[in-house]
Image (spheres, rainbow, N blue to C red):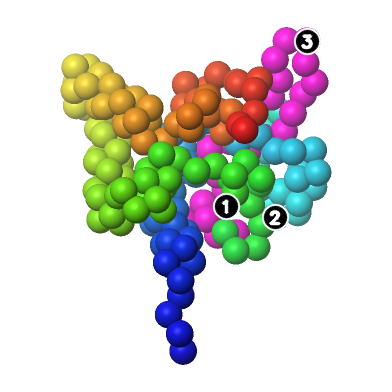
Amino acid sequence: MSALPPEHERARDGATLCLRCGLCCDGTLFSRTELKPGEVETARSLGVSLISIGDAGSATRSAIPQGCSLFRDGCCSSYGRWRPQACGDYVCRLLSGYVGGTRTLAECLEVVRVVREADADARQPASGGLARLRAAGLLEVFRRKFFETESDPGPMGPKDGSVSGSTAP
């Protein structure tokens, strides 16, 4: 059996990082994932929870609220079968660096660990206002540094819950 060429190894490792991270699926980073019109029925057939979104004066669109109902046991339960196009197209800066060879899997998973800790701290009502504010600020720094795409987050929607009318390139 021959070894995979480096570009195939990286692609497989990219999926490994995604399946071990899940921050774009669990509600930590984004509030929702917009669906293309042709994806709505497939999502419904899989039992995915959907919401309707829309800006004033525009058509209503369907979206999956985050944490995604397909995200189970720390990963996407439908990863190999079906995902919305927005999920398949989304490449965060952390993944881009890993696939591009500028970050190791260990470095990426350390970022994921720190983000999860900051998210947990930000959600703790007993940790006091200043500690929660610091954790929320840290989350925002990590979101901007590692998880936004070069343009706005497009159909994934920013964590603040506002609806973006643009789509990712």
The percent position of residue 73, horizontal first and vertical second, equals 44, 58
The secondary structure type at the circle numbered 3 is loop
- Residue 37: x and y, percent? 79, 38
Query: Which residue is identified by label 2?
Result: 46
| Mark 2–mark 1 CB contact (< 8 Å) | yes
Query: In which quarter of the view is residue 143 placed?
Result: top left
Residue in the image at 42% along x and 45% along y: 96
70 to the left or right of 72: right
Which residue is at a point 60% across and 63% down the rendered structure image? 80
Depth order, front residue of 28/125: 28
Residue on which the image places disc 3: 57
Q: Is residue 99 left or right of residue 122?
A: right
The magenta region covers 53-78
Residue designated by label 1:
70
Residue found at x 62% / y 41%: 86
Q: Seen from this angle, which residue lies furthest bottom?
A: 1
- Mark 1 residue element: loop
Up the image or down, 126 lies above or below 87; here it is: above
